[in-house]
Amino acid sequence: MSDNPAPQADSRQIALRIDESRMATTYANTIRTSTTQDEVVLDFGMNLPVPGPDNQPTLLFTVGSRVVMNWAGAKRLAISLGQVIRQFEDRNGQINIGAQPGPAGGGTPPRLAQ
């Protein structure tokens, strides 16, 4: 038996200051993801319908901003978004994202795992 007390967890609190002076706010209605071995690339932008050849409807994806993060940051983002969406749906009901447009659309909309 030891006479030394067990080490206590560090109970100091650290103040967090958030600097929003260089922040830009944009709206995105779609996202494109790509990956490398080390990073996840998220392109946020707008899908806009435009007339294509022979007046066929075409979606134009205009990228407004790109976020590159490591896999650990991407996982923290996924967890945080999942929690926020579940809380919203608990208060307001399921978010229906509906069928995707185009020939590959239809079917059941995806749901977040519980």
Image: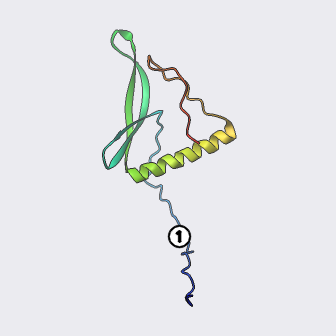
Q: Position of residue 58 (x, y in %)?
A: 39, 19
Q: Residue at x 53, y 70 (%)?
A: 14
Q: Residue furthest right?
A: 91
Q: Which residue, as the protein is rendered here, is positioned at the far left? A: 37
Q: Is residue 51 left or right of residue 82?
A: left
- Looking at this view, name the residue that lies furthest to the top: 54
Q: Secondary structure at mark 1?
A: loop
Q: Depth check: 76 or 24 in front?
A: 76
Q: Where on the picture, by quarter, is residue 1?
A: bottom right
Seen at 46% across and 40% down, the residue is: 26
Q: Position of residue 80 (x, y in %)?
A: 53, 49
Give residue 110's position: percent from left, percent from top: 53, 31
What count of labels does the image hold? 1
Q: Position of residue 87 (x, y in %)?
A: 63, 45
> Can you identify the residue that label 1 sits on?
14
Please tell me whether residue 9 is drawn above or below residue 98 in the rendered image: below
Residue that sits furthest to the front in the current view: 1
Q: Nearer the viewer, residue 7 or 28?
A: 7
If the image is split into quadrants, where does the C terminus sit? top right
Q: What residue lies at 59% left-to-right and 29% top-to-bottom?
A: 96
In this view of the protein, which residue sits in the foreground, 77 or 19? 77
**Which kind of residue does numbered mark 1 sit on?**
Ile
The answer to whether 1 appears left or right of 50 in the picture is: right
